[in-house]
Amino acid sequence: MTELKGALIGCGFFAINQMHAWNDVDGADIVAICDRDPGRLKIVGDQFGIERRYRDAEAMFADGGFDFADIATTVQSHRALVEMAARNRVPAICQKPFAKTLSDAKAMVEACRNAGVALMVHENFRWQTPVQAVRKALAANAIGKPFWGRFSFRSGYDVFSGQPYLAEGERFIIEDLGIHTLDIARYILGDVSSLTARAERVNPGIKGEDVATILLDHENGATSVVDVSYATKLSKEPFPETLIELDGAEGTIRLSQGYRLEITNGRGTTTMDVSPRLLPWASRPWHNIQESVGAIQQHWVDQLKRGEEHSTSGADNLKTFALVEAAYDSAAQRKTVDVKAML
Ligand code: NAD
Ligand code: 89Y
């Protein structure tokens, strides 16, 4: 297979996973890296044997020699870097959260569309093995038409030691983690017409909200609840599992802790282990997320080569990002928000 050449921008905490995954992906190699922090540049460059190293993304684009950019910085720089890629006619992957605001996200999609380059948001949670298994069961009509769902992520895991910036932002769980859970809800039950949310901060040591409960009205008539918490101390820590409950006209699906999938319908109940693989470079409990990073990056390469749209294209992700903005608005104003009117 022809190898695409990629350039990674942002060599921080999560980029290590992306670099390992690029080593596994068929059809692409990372040939250049960029980070404004020389320490991070050296750590990642040395670990992965990348010679071309830049502290300035403009300089890296000016030198060129790559077919796509993989933007793994935090949200503050996403718009500038995506627009830089578009100006240089380079297809780009951008980490979540896609942007700081929905209007920035719309401008980023527009810039790439006008430049004629692909844009994918690194929204990897829908690529997790257990989530794929739920979607497959639904597509196989295992429970008939779904009318209700719950997408739940409740944890007491210390995410602040690896990602200290998460404790410092005005916004936390909806923007950082709930964004994935909302995307899974869309992926499983379809687009959302309106939403009602409540949010609060339980942990006094952080600035933003760490608990949120969101009621979604899906366009197909189904109702779902997305509930997320980093203030939930359980006897068995579930991080980073998303638990899913679906009720359909002819049965139920339950994805429960320990990656156990149970399907009940007129034929009885079947139980499956849908655990993610523990890749050689991965470590528990992150292996579920780490495996999905490889899956989404392989999807990027495959669709780019076919010239087809990505599952989590920039345009698709506007519909997930709108849910994030709507949730903050709904929680602040204590009102139901018309999501379709935002798009
Ligand atoms: P980080 O702060 O550890 O790393 C970001 C790196 O980008 C830093 O080294 C910083 O110096 C560099 N950087 C920032 N702006 C830059 C610029 N303009 N040019 C060059 N370098 C720049 O952050 P992180 O924890 O690795 O998170 C990065 C992104 O990944 C965040 O948006 C986060 O939400 C996301 N993330 C995604 C997942 C997932 O499962 N998809 C998991 C964790 C984090
Ligand atoms: O940043 C978050 C993400 O995207 O997945 C889990 C995480 O690392 C902490 O909430």
Image (cartoon, grey):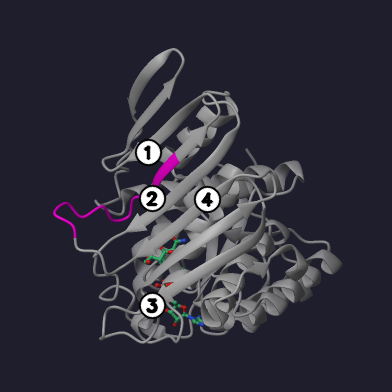
Q: Are marks 3 and 4 in contact (CB under 8 Å)?
A: no
Q: Amino acid at mark 4?
A: Ser
Q: Nearer the viewer, residue 224 or 52?
A: 224
Q: Position of residue 174 (x, y in %)?
A: 47, 70
SS under mark 1: strand
- Residue linked to disc 2: 242
Q: Position of residue 201 (x, y in %)?
A: 34, 79
Percent position (x, y) of residue 259? 31, 38
Disc number placed over residue 309 in the picture, else none: none
> Is residue 242 magenta-colored?
yes
Looking at the image, is mark 3 or mark 4 earlier in the sequence?
A: 3
Q: Which residue is mark 4?
A: 224
Residue at mark 3 to residue at mark 1: CA–CA distance: 26 Å
SS of the residue under disc 4? strand
Could you tell me what secondary structure mostly forms the magenta stretch?
Answer: loop
For the record, the magenta segment spans 234-245
Q: Which mark is residue 255?
A: 1
**Whether residue 205 is situated above or below residue 19 in the rendered picture:** below
Comparing 63 with 181, the one in front is 181
SS at mark 2?
loop
Mark 2 residue crowding within 10 angstroms, few (<14) / some (14–19) / many (20+): many
- For label 3, the SS is strand
At 26% across and 80% down in the image, what residue appears?
A: 203
